[in-house]
Image (cartoon, rainbow, N blue to C red):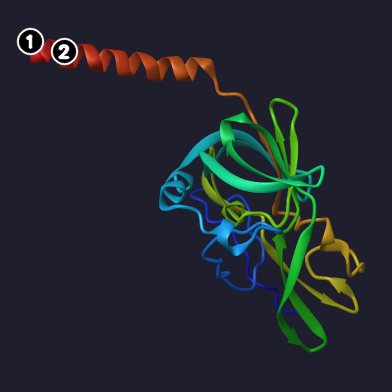
């Protein structure tokens, strides 16, 4: 039985999983129910949404394991969601988010061989919980969530919310289950299923402020 290739790139190897091929990502993220005209956001918005930063977070994997470190995500992003039958457009700042959780996955067939079907699973429905207690459900998930640069004391890694698994009469290759709908709501043991954001360390922010202050004073003295 040949396992498909799915991997984490990491400076200090921690783990690896099987994945069939490097997926071709769509050019633009999209949200269910949004018209084509609404998807064509301005270049200015695209430029803002393309800026990423590392945020302190605890990342939960499908196995239940948790990793603490910093994950790279857009500083801000715009989306549309439905509330009480009305469509709203909202620009969210990641620093104001408490958690992002994947609720369901959608699948597509990658290959069929010897009565075994290999599927790719993408996050479909996600729930975003904000620090002000507001919760928003989006479907499908934006594609910037598929691949997550991550770093902690062990080094740097690339984590994924997308994954692949093969199904045959004996069940799934990557999980001990024969339930064909298992991955409808459950991810791969090594895929990211939830991100819980941690508060920024005040001491760290203060140190950066001190460095900026010292630099400013030095430049001022030099100009004299």
Q: Is residue 18 left or right of residue 54?
A: right
In this view, the residue in front, 2 or 60, is 60
Considering every residue shown, the one lying at the far bottom of the view is 114
Find the distance from the CA under tag 2 to the CA under tag 1: 7 Å
Vertical arrangement, residue 211 with respect to residue 108, above or below: above
In the picture, which quadrant includes the C terminus? top left
Quarter that holds the N terminus: bottom right
Q: Quadrant of residue 197?
A: top right
19 up-or-down from 115: above or below: above
Q: Are marks 2 and 1 in contact (CB under 8 Å)?
A: yes
In the figure, is residue 149 to the left or right of 195? left
| Spot occupied by residue 9 in the image (x, y as percentages of width and height) | 53, 56
SS class, disc 1: loop
In the rendered image, which quarter is residue 122 located in? bottom right
Quick one: SS at disc 2? Answer: helix
Q: Which residue is mark 2?
A: 220
The image position of residue 215, as x and y in percent, is 25, 17
Q: Residues within 10 Å of mark 1 (few under 14, many from 20)?
A: few
Q: Nearer the viewer, residue 194 or 126?
A: 126
When asked about the image quadrant of residue 131, the answer is top right
Which residue in the protein does label 1 denote? 224
Q: Residue at x 44, y 14 (%)?
A: 206
Q: Nearer the viewer, residue 51 or 4?
A: 51
For residue 137, which numbered disc appears in the image? none
Q: Which residue corresponds to the image point at 87% horizontal and 62% vertical from the top-left?
A: 182
Q: Position of residue 109 (x, y in %)?
A: 73, 77
Q: Residue at x 62, y 59 (%)?
A: 30
Residue 29, position as x, y percentages in the image: 58, 58
Instruction: Name the residue at 70% across, 54% down.
Output: 190
Local crowd at mark 2 within 10 Å, few (<14), some, or many (≥20)?
A: few
């Amino acid at each position: 039985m040949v396992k498909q290739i799915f991997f984490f790139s990491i400076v200090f190897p921690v783990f690896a999983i099987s994945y069939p091929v490097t997926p071709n990502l769509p050019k633009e993220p999209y949200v269910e129910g949004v018209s084509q005209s609404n998807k064509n956001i301005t270049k200015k918005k695209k430029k803002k949404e393309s800026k990423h930063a590392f945020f302190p977070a605890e990342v939960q994997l499908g196995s239940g394991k948790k990793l603490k470190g910093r994950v790279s995500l857009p500083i801000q992003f715009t989306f549309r969601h439905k509330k009480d039958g009305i469509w709203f457009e909202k620009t969210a700042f990641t620093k104001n988010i408490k958690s992002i959780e994947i609720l369901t996955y959608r699948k597509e067939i990658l290959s069929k061989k010897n009565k075994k079907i290999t599927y790719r699973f993408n996050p479909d429905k996600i729930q975003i919980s904000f620090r002000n207690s507001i919760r928003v459900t989006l479907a499908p998930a934006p594609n910037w969530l598929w691949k997550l640069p991550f770093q902690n004391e062990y080094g740097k890694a690339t984590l994924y919310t997308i994954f692949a698994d093969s199904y045959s009469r004996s069940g799934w290759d990557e999980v001990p289950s024969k339930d064909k709908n298992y991955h409808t709501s459950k991810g791969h043991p090594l895929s990211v299923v939830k991100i819980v954001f941690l508060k920024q360390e005040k001491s760290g922010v203060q140190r950066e402020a001190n460095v900026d202050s010292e630099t400013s004073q030095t430049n001022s003295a030099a100009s004299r």
